[in-house]
Image (spheres, grey):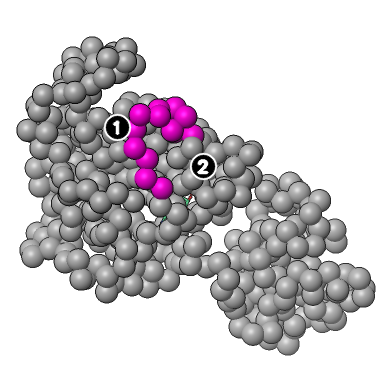
């Protein structure tokens, strides 16, 4: 990665005499003729640098519009690789880049769209010890990630570096958008959300689902806010935009208050680089480990959990089991293991006793999609029926499909 001066865009940057190539007038002419944009706007974009953290559902559309609009330098940070289940919304990736780092796949796509711009590829996860160094070279930071620890880390780093943070989120049919640490006394993410959300109220797209076009709407708006900031078209009024694809009017916006003097990040003396490095953002967020920290970890009490191979062995040896699938009914209808019965988790938690009898002669095995809800269900059963052997399946049906039956149609 190239090391450049830390430059927040200033008035003089925008008014410096522009040096566009002849072709650029043709290429960007449709936006250059806009009132308030003009040649200075285009030259400002060309001189600016932007970093997109997360090249997933939000990052892809954001990157696409930033590259097309002529932002001179774009950094892409993502440690993850493209999977088939990403293609429904992560529109810069394609079938031939499954298995490739998302940062590389996205960079290839945007360089095809605009070969004139500089693209920096960073295939490592952003964490507290590298955030300052990785984000330092850029004028604007885009949060296109999907987990609370990274959101707080990005906000603190943006405050520490004095850069605007364009933050997006999308889940199910809904999305949110806000610009933090910008404008006259604009708040940071911590000013608005001083405490992380309760663990049980958050989930990734993998857990809750998301309509691809919803991430398209929010990611595109993140690009738009970034372009407004760079070109001086942003009024700097702190706002939280709420989008719901199923409710008219689709957009609502809430005026945000200014920076909080008591905020531990942007109030008082503010956050220090050293503080960021020492902070355990995952612990602060109640241990909601992002996917990249979960990989390879095993959880649950020893012996209480079984691997998919053990479940297969049970099937083959005709061991007597009661197999309970705790996914929502709509998901059970998509696919299920033969012989399993569906008891959605909320129903089970509401009344665990009515779903297994006291004289259950065999073992009870709980399964879900990824192996998280099944742990909760198994613990609940153990409490209510301590005499019955209850196990749950590590990695759930996803692991069954990956390790035992590749034809099992997991989503
Ligand atoms: N700390 C981080 N550093 C770099 N990239 C991150 C970090 N946290 C999250 N991301 C990336 O942000 C992106 C979020 O996008 P999105 O939720 O659409 O993708 P996903 O995690 O692949 O989806 P799914 O939840 O369906 O598996 C992911 O590509 C993820 O790797
Ligand atoms: Zn703050």
Disc 2 target residue: 105
Secondary structure under tag 1 reads loop
Secondary structure under tag 2 reads helix
Which one is nearer the viewer's eye here, 389 or 86?
86
Who's the residue at 47% across and 29% down the image?
A: 112
- Residue 280: give x, y in percent of width and height: 33, 72
In the figure, is residue 267 to the left or right of 387?
A: left
- Residue 54: give x, y in percent of width and height: 42, 49
Query: For residue 398, which quarter of the picture?
Result: bottom right
Who's the residue at 18% across and 18% down the image?
A: 39
Q: Residues within 10 Å of mark 2 (few under 14, many from 20)?
A: many
Q: Is residue 46 found inside the magenta-colored segment of the image?
A: no
In the figure, is residue 320 to the left or right of 105?
A: right
In the figure, is residue 101 to the left or right of 37?
A: right
Q: Does label 1 or label 2 sit earlier along the sequence? A: 1
Disc 1 target residue: 71
Q: Is mark 1 within 8 Å of ligand 1?
A: no
Q: Is residue 117 found inside the magenta-colored segment of the image?
A: yes
Q: Residues within 10 Å of mark 1 (few under 14, many from 20)?
A: many
In the figure, is residue 183 to the left or right of 57?
A: left
- Report the span colored magenta: 109-121
Who's the residue at 52% across and 50% down the image?
A: 101
Q: Is residue 356 visible?
A: no
- Above or below, 163 against 385 in this view is above
Query: For residue 111, which quarter of the picture?
Result: top left
Who's the residue at 34% across and 33% down the image?
A: 117
Q: Is mark 2 within 8 Å of ligand 1?
A: no
């Amino acid at each position: 990665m190239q090391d450049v001066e830390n430059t927040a865009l200033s008035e003089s940057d925008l008014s410096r005499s522009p040096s566009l190539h002849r072709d650029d007038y043709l290429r960007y002419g449709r936006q250059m003729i806009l009132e308030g944009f003009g040649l200075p706007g285009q030259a400002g974009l060309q001189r600016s640098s932007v970093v997109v953290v997360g090249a997933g559902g939000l990052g892809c559309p954001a990157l696409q519009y930033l590259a097309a609009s002529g932002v001179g330098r774009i950094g892409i940070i993502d440690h993850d690789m493209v999977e088939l289940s990403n293609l429904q919304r992560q529109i810069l990736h394609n079938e031939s880049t499954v298995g490739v780092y998302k940062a590389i796949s996205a960079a290839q796509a945007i360089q095809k769209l605009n070969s004139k711009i500089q693209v920096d590829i960073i295939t490592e996860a952003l964490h507290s010890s590298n955030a300052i160094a990785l984000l330092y070279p850029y004028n604007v930071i885009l949060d296109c990630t999907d987990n609370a620890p990274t959101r707080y880390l990005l906000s603190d780093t943006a405050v520490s570096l004095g850069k605007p943070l364009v933050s997006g989120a999308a889940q199910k049919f809904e999305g949110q958008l806000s610009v933090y640490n910008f404008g006259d006394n604009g708040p940071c993410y911590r000013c608005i959300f001083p405490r992380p959300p309760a663990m049980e109220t958050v989930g990734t797209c993998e857990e809750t689902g998301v309509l691809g076009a919803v991430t398209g709407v929010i990611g595109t708006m993140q690009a738009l806010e970034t372009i407004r900031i760079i070109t001086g078209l942003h009024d700097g009024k702190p706002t939280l935009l709420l989008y719901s694809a199923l409710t008219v009017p689709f957009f609502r916006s809430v005026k945000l208050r200014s920076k909080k003097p008591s905020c531990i990040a942007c109030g008082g003396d503010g956050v220090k680089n050293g503080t960021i490095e020492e902070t355990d953002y995952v612990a602060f967020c109640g241990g909601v480990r992002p996917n990249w920290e979960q990989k390879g970890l095993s959880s649950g009490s020893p012996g209480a959990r079984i691997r998919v191979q053990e479940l297969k062995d049970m099937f083959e040896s005709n061991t007597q089991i009661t197999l309970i699938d705790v996914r929502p009914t709509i998901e059970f209808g998509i696919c299920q293991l033969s012989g399993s019965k569906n008891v959605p988790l909320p129903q089970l938690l509401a009344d665990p006793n009515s779903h297994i009898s006291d004289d259950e002669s065999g073992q009870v095995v709980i399964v879900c999609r990824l192996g998280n809800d099944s742990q909760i269900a198994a613990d609940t059963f153990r409490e209510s029926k301590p005499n019955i052997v209850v196990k749950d399946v590590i990695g759930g049906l996803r692991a069954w499909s990956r390790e035992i039956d590749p034809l099992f149609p997991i989503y």
